[in-house]
Image: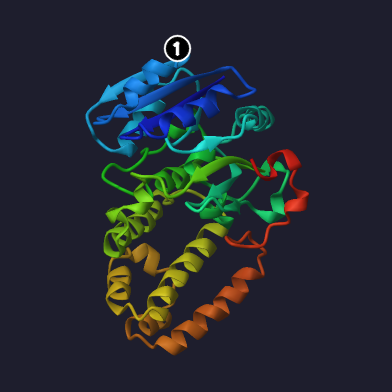
Amino acid sequence: MITVVIPLYNKAHTIKNTLNTVLNQTFSEYEIIIVNDGSTDDGVKIIKDNFNDQRIRIINQNNYGVSVARDRGIKEAKYNYIALLDADDNWHPDYLSIMQEAINKYPNASLYASGGLIQNANGSIVYRLANKYINQILPVRFFENPFLFCHTSGTIINRRYFNKTDGSPQGMLCLQDFALFMQLALVGKFIYIGIPISKYIGGVKGQTTSVSVAKKFNLLKYVCFLYNFIQTKRNNINVDNTFNIYFKYDIRNRIKNFMKEQDLRGLDYFINNLSLENLSLFSRLEIILYKKKYITLSILWINFTKCIWRMHRFPVIGEKINSKKINPKYRIW
């Protein structure tokens, strides 16, 4: 049994299609909780006018933000396995069936995530998939590449482990989902489903990723918060070495991008707002290199460390996907 949690805020133009992809699932043992986060459009009316399914429950609240809405849905759920879905994304009809297969195989994991498709505004399709794990359901080290493995609408969480976390940090307008996923990965096992059965729909009106919240410094604030927050959560937890390897790789990559773009103000903000725990991942000499803005030398060094990172053969965002390995049923849908 699975609870589907959908936060709803001004998505009247997409919620009907999203709900249809849930109700058309080949797996039927689920409930749907829609948390109406103070919407000012007709989203709730559209649901009531078009759907008469006893599995749908609507909870109304003031506009506290997607983190609060999602966490409330999780707490109100009847079942321990919670499938997260944004109100503008889609699922393949076999999504819940395949995710339930993963749960049956690994019932004590904290987090389950599937591969997926990204449908861009122009209609083009890109895979969000780890090549080395295509067609597999297996435990994976989450910090091999968190941002490749997880997308909110392709994720199921185990509430028994959710209760061991602080949930989604309130006030974060982006990356709050990853703050939750990373906490879950620290306290339990992560299961990856290498099948593209969820779909992120890009370019939708009202998307967080396409509005002013994504302005550079606002985004930077949340990036720094995420790094610092997760470092505090790993204290007293015996994490494997991929945690530090990934954090060092990702921080260096962001520093390199600032330097390539000559965004020295952003670079200063980023370095100055990282916690001491994060800065301690690097040698004092390396930090001086970045703070003194020795750009050419810094980029050379980061490129060298990136070559070492590649030797681990972790999955990479943007790698060419061997689509022939994917079951034709799930290739493009």
Between 209 and 136, the one lying in front of the other is 209
Image x and y of residue 125, in percent: 59, 51
Residue 169 placement, left or right of 299: left
Using a 10 Å C-alpha cutoff, classify the residue at mark 1 as few (fewer than 14 neighbours), some (14 to 19) or many (20 or more).
Answer: few
Q: Nearer the viewer, residue 322 or 68?
A: 322
Q: Which residue in the structure is indicated by mark 1? A: 52
Q: Pinpoint residue 107: horizontal percent, then vertical percent.
A: 62, 29
Up-down relation of residue 125 to residue 63 (above or below): below
Q: Quadrant of the N terminus?
A: top right
Query: At 52% from the left edge and 36% from the top edge, which residue is drawn?
Result: 90
Residue 172 rendering spot, x and y as whole percentages? 30, 47
Q: Position of residue 32 (x, y in %)?
A: 46, 21
Quarter of the figure that contains the C terminus: top right
In the rendered view, would you say 257 is above or below 36? below
Secondary structure of the residue carrying tag 1 is loop
Residue depicted at x 73% and y 56%: 322
Asked whether, in this view, residue 106 is left or right of residue 159, the answer is right
Q: Is residue 279 above or below residue 243?
A: below
Determine which quarter of the picture holds residue 93.
top right
At horizontal 60% and vertical 24% (from top left) the residue drawn is 25
Of 257 and 123, nearer the camera is 123
Q: Amino acid at mark 1?
A: Asn
Q: Outermost residue toward the front? A: 122
Residue placed at 61% from the left, 52% from the top?
Answer: 127
- Horizontal side of 239 relative to 321 (left or right) equals left
Q: Is residue 321 visible?
A: yes
